[in-house]
Image (tube, rainbow, N blue to C red):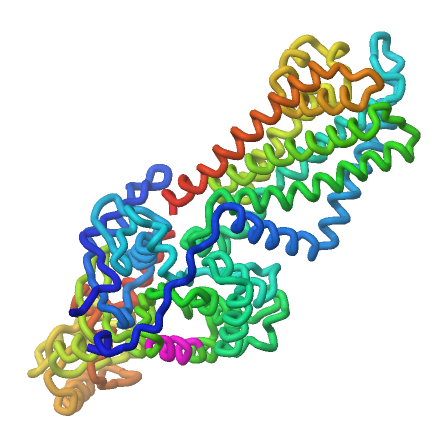
Amino acid sequence: MVSHALEAVELVKTYRGARKKPPLRALDGLTFNVPEGVVLGLLGPNGAGKSTTVKILTTLSRADSGTARVAGFDVIKDPDAVRRVIGYVPQKPSADPMATGIENLLLSGRIYGLSRQDAVRRAAELLERFDLTEAGGRQVRTYSGGMQRRLDVALGLVHRPRVLFLDEPTTGLDPEARTDLWTEVERLSGDEGLTVLLTTHYLEEADRLADQLAIVDHGKIVAEGTPEALKAELRGDSVHVELVDPDTDGHVRALLAQLPGIGEIVAEGNTLRARVDRGATAVPAVLGALEDKAIPVTAVTVSRPSLDDVYLSYTGRSFKSAEIREEGRAA
Amino acid sequence: MATMTAVTTTTSAARPGGLLAHTILVTGRWLRAQYRSPALIAFTLVQPAIWLLLFGQLFKGVVNLPGFSNPSYIAFLTPGIVMMTALMTSGWNGTTFIADMERGVMDRMLASPVRRGALMAGQLISNATTTVLQTILVFAIGMAAGARYDGGATGYLVTIVVSVLVGTAFGSLSNAVALLTRQQEALIAISQFISLPLTFMSSIMMDPKLAPHWVEVAARFNPVDWAAITAREALSATPDWSSATRHGAYLLAFTLLVAYLSTRAFHTYQRSV
């Protein structure tokens, strides 16, 4: 039997609008299941409803309608039971900056009911594991961003939760710290059947860390599956043409659309992205056509489908443009 | 599936402690933070000293007004300054909650089994230790300035207890405003807007019998004035214990009510996130 560590059914959540703004429907019938021991990546642009989902599942917030169960416990009927079995790493740094790393871990462990001895042992174990042993006695405000984030994850694990929520764990980290944290999160999934719900707006992060992906758009799941399966559903390759000047009147697009074996084309700034049956034959054709018409080009690249393409095909817009638009909306 | 074969070594944490255990833990957190900010401590202690001496000098002539009840203005002023200090310092209380909300600390706590009452009580107890220190210091300075308090040990004790009630009532009110507004600026504005009238529409600096009638009426409904009256009676040579007890009881009831309502504010906060 596969038991579900997380179940969300038809979650709806509307935030009251600020003055003179319409209410914001953050979740619009969001449904998904996560089996035990799986790392689920909830992928979507800012404002898609990822954090709202996490807040509802961690009992912080309540859905207007719909139900959710975490490790079998209903988040509305039995929030205390849910709180005991989850670890929550919020989007923002969540350690007390005035306390030391050890004090933060001890306080958290004791709140969850560990004895003083057990809490001390567990704190030492986690500091070691997250490479914070030396910094453990220092106040958290002296930590670098990467160190704080590692401590945040450690805080989420103090009480050996069954489900761990990581809300945008690497947002705002420099590339090196991000890679470090990825390594840590990868190690988590091997951990004692721990189920992880990870939200991210980095495609690369989702691709690397998640066993299962759910793409969220406008408060709904629009696609689900393993990263590989989602990519495999897209036939062919993706060709990116970077022009010197933007294709404002669409004539380049029209030109490329006539070529054989070329599917859907999306223009974005100076870049045209096309789905093609076979990259190897499409690229010479594209280059030839552009050269005939003397259209200056910076680069033409061909790639296997990426999650970006998956996102594009399910939501009808590229991840980057969605990101920009949603950011404006959320602000 | 891997889930079938995995040996279940996961043990959910022991049952989390109750309100008392959590309150002790949370109190420890705030006490440690407090005593790691020496500049803040120095400031919270210097402030009441300055008020006592400044107002003591500024208004010392009022004892010459016909009908003023106490021949030593500093002695008259001391309990008032104690309450004013407790009020003003506690008005800032909520800034600690705002800082927790701006980071993810509050959300992490609220998603844990920690008792909401403990989150509130722990912070207020730590605040109360500051109030006690401030109160003792105001007495020390008053004495150094020549004031004598006839009420003795009982008088000092009552004043300390009452000042802690003021600090707790307005400290939890400040925390509630923090949870409801989630904005530093709003909190400070509201706290200033409330604390100045509460200070001046009272017997803190002036015997209300000598103030306009409406001030006297307003003071009757002012918890800070209840506190000042209770402490002043307890410190006097011939306390009117019936008045002290009555005003002390009003204050206690007010404090309990506000602390309870403020703890409810966690729910309102959670509804808005």
Q: Is residue B244 left or right of residue B8?
A: right
Is residue A328 among the parts visible in the rendering? no
Q: Residue at x 84, y 27 (%)?
A: B152
Which of the 4 image quadrants contains residue B174?
top right
- Say above or below: A71 vs A1: above
Residue B249 x/y as whole percent: 62, 22
Residue depicted at x 71% and y 10%: B212
Q: How many marks?
A: 0
Q: Quadrant of the N terminus of chain A?
A: bottom left
Report the magenta stretch's main SS: helix
Image coords of residue A238 (percent x, y): 19, 81
Give the magenta part as a residue range: A181-189
Measuring 51% from the left and 67% from the top, which residue is drawn there?
Answer: A118
Q: Nearer the viewer, residue A146 or A39?
A: A39
The quarter of the picture where residue A224 lies is: bottom left
Compared with A184, A87 (above or below) is: above
Q: Position of residue B57 (x, y in %)?
A: 87, 28
Q: Is B45 displayed left or right of A38 in the figure?
A: right
Please indicate whether residue A250 sits to the left or right of residue A192 in the image.
left
Q: Which residue is rendered at x = 47% and y = 75% of the image?
A: A174
| Of A329 and A118, the residue lying toward us | A118
Q: Nearer the viewer, residue B154 or A65?
A: B154
- Where residue B205 appears, as percent x and y from the top left, is 77, 22
Residue B124 can be seen, yes or no = yes
Q: Is residue B245 magenta?
A: no
Report whether B21 appears left or right of B229: left
**In this view, B140 is above or below B221:** below
Q: Which residue occupies the foreground of this view, A281 or A83?
A: A83
The stretch drawn in magenta includes residue A183: yes
Q: Is residue B110 above or below residue A311?
A: above
